[in-house]
Amino acid sequence: MRVLLVEDNAKLAAVISDAMRAHGFTIDHVAKARDAEEAAATVDYDAIILDLGLPDRDGLTLIEPLRKIAPSTPS
């Protein structure tokens, strides 16, 4: 299962990524909303884990564009 992790806190992202990889997930990590949109447009993710407090945009406002870019990906 391939998951996009959108989290700007590097330490937290590392902990989440390591734990999920230990359970067999493939994790792609980005720290900004802009990068999340680019990633979702180029990779078919099984799920997106989204931080609500991103440096370039509120995570809640990112949900709608992500759903348009990748409508079949749960976020």
Image (cartoon, rainbow, N blue to C red):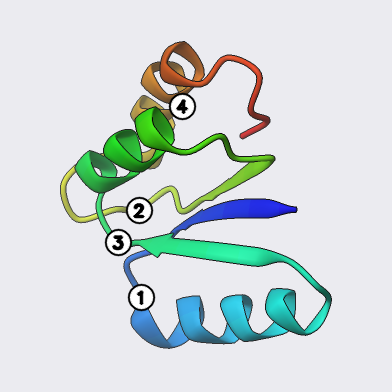
Determine the secondary structure under disc 4.
helix
Do we see residue 58 in this rendering?
A: no
Q: Which residue is denoted by mark 2 in the rendering?
A: 53
- Sequence-wise, the earlier of marks 2 and 4 is 2
Q: Which mark is residue 31?
A: 3
Name the kind of residue labelled 2 in the image.
Answer: Gly
Q: Which residue is denoted by mark 1 in the rendering?
A: 9
Determine the secondary structure under disc 1.
loop
- Sequence-wise, the earlier of marks 3 and 1 is 1
Q: Which residue is denoted by mark 4 in the rendering?
A: 63
Dot 4 alpha-carbon crowd within 10 angstroms: few under 14, some 14 to 19, many 20 or more: some
Q: Between marks 2 and 4, how big is the CA–CA gap?
A: 12 Å
Dot 1 alpha-carbon crowd within 10 angstroms: few under 14, some 14 to 19, many 20 or more: few
Circles 3, 2 touching at the beta carbon (< 8 Å)? no
Do we see residue 35 in this rendering?
A: yes
Residue 22, by quadrant, is bottom right
